Image (cartoon, rainbow, N blue to C red):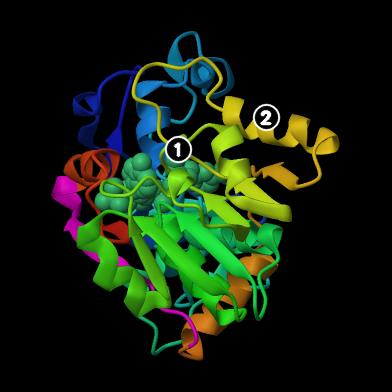
Amino acid sequence: MRAYAQDRFGPLTDLELREVPVPQPGAGEVLVQVTAAGVDPSIWHLVTANPRMVRLVWGRWGRPKWPVPGWDLSGTVVRVGPSVTELSVGDRVVGQARGTFQEYAVAPVSTLVTVPDPLDLTAVAALPVSGVTAYQAVESVQPGPGKRIAVIGAGGGVGGFAVQLAARAGAEVTAVCSAGKADLVRGLGASEVIDYRATDVTESGRTFDGIIELAGRRPQGALRRLLTKRGRLVVVGGEPTGTEWLGMGRMLQATLSNPFVPQHLHGLVATMPKETLQELVDLLAAGDLRVPLDRAFPFEEAVEAVQFVRDGHPHGKVVVAVGG
Ligand SMILES: NC(=O)c1ccc[n+]([C@@H]2O[C@H](COP(=O)([O-])OP(=O)(O)OC[C@H]3O[C@@H](n4cnc5c(N)ncnc54)[C@H](OP(=O)(O)O)[C@@H]3O)[C@@H](O)[C@H]2O)c1
């Protein structure tokens, strides 16, 4: 089978498409023929070891412990490991594995959710990292009827889900994104759009009950001035322009400042509960959520897909169509 792999941390161009043996599932695992792999900024971080901390956590003797990139997958179960009863050959699934930029991936059953027939298996690969992160970020700002929520970085993978989930909870959503993404975010439920290139939202005089910070790395003090007295800020991301050591400074700052201010500040490190993924699949199946899919890159262009996300171009979410 074909797989992308890297022998050392470095530029995306070091990723090579190779012929490798098909892996075998162990106890509690299944082999999935991968239909699509989700692309998010973390793939670039892990391939290039920026922040540098990646080398400590993700590396061994300077080499990546897991040479195949990618977390999110959708596909079809083609083999089940010993003691697996929850899934069978032929089941359509979405979830996570260590290394999804490959034609077959071994995934723990504990991360997988079955995908009902009408759902598009390619689009659904967009769900795990971005959908679940959006769900947890939205939960953190406690949206509801009458609440004003700002999503900063609304036009990307996480933002596209966050706008929908906050609007669905009854909040009035202000999307902060570039002008070209205004139609996209309005279509997802935003009632107001601020083009951050034309207007500095932190100087706009508005206040919000909740802010989901996904991009732009605005100073925490400036974001707090946008909040109501008891407003809630969740810091999820914001891409570095240079090389960082830890990469979590802004999230730590939010969480550590929280006890000392009247507002609620939270740095989110997303987890991946299967129940949340199941809830999102149910919402998709019911037509209450949609995947804001920019495009599916062909497998042969997986490296370009990661670069495309890194460059900040996507209108919503990007996946790689692997096969199946
Ligand atoms: N903490 C966690 O557990 C966790 C989990 C998942 C992701 N993340 C992080 O969350 C962030 C968002 O992830 P993502 O997948 O949504 O990334 P993405 O798809 O690249 O989306 C980010 C969006 O932000 C917009 N943007 C760039 N500069 C901006 C600015 N100054 N102000 C407002 N918007 C700006 C970009 O579009 P336009 O400029 O065209 O509007 C881009 O679409 C990333 O930093 C990612 O690493 C963190």
Circle 2 SS class: helix
Whole-percent x and y of residue 206? 52, 57
Disc 1 residue lies near ligand 1 with CB under 8 A: yes
Neighbour tally class for label 1: few under 14, some 14-19, many 20 plus, Cα within 10 Å: some
Whole-percent x and y of residue 147? 64, 72
Q: Earlier in the sequence, mark 2 or mark 1?
A: 1
Q: Is residue 71 magenta?
A: no
Which residue corresponds to the image point at 14% horizontal and 48% vertical from the top-left? Answer: 300
Circle 1 SS class: loop
Residue identifier under label 2: 252
On screen, residue 185 above or below 62? below
Which residue corresponds to the image point at 50% horizontal and 18% vertical from the top-left? Answer: 59
Q: Is residue 296 left or right of residue 131?
A: left
- Disc 1 residue type (three-letter): Gly
Whole-percent x and y of residue 252? 67, 29
Neighbour tally class for label 2: few under 14, some 14-19, many 20 plus, Cα within 10 Å: some
Classify residue 209 by image quadrant: bottom right
Which of the labelled discs sits on residue 238, or is there none? 1
Q: Which residues are magenta?
A: 288-301
Question: In this orientation, which residue lies closer to the viewer: 40 or 21?
Answer: 40
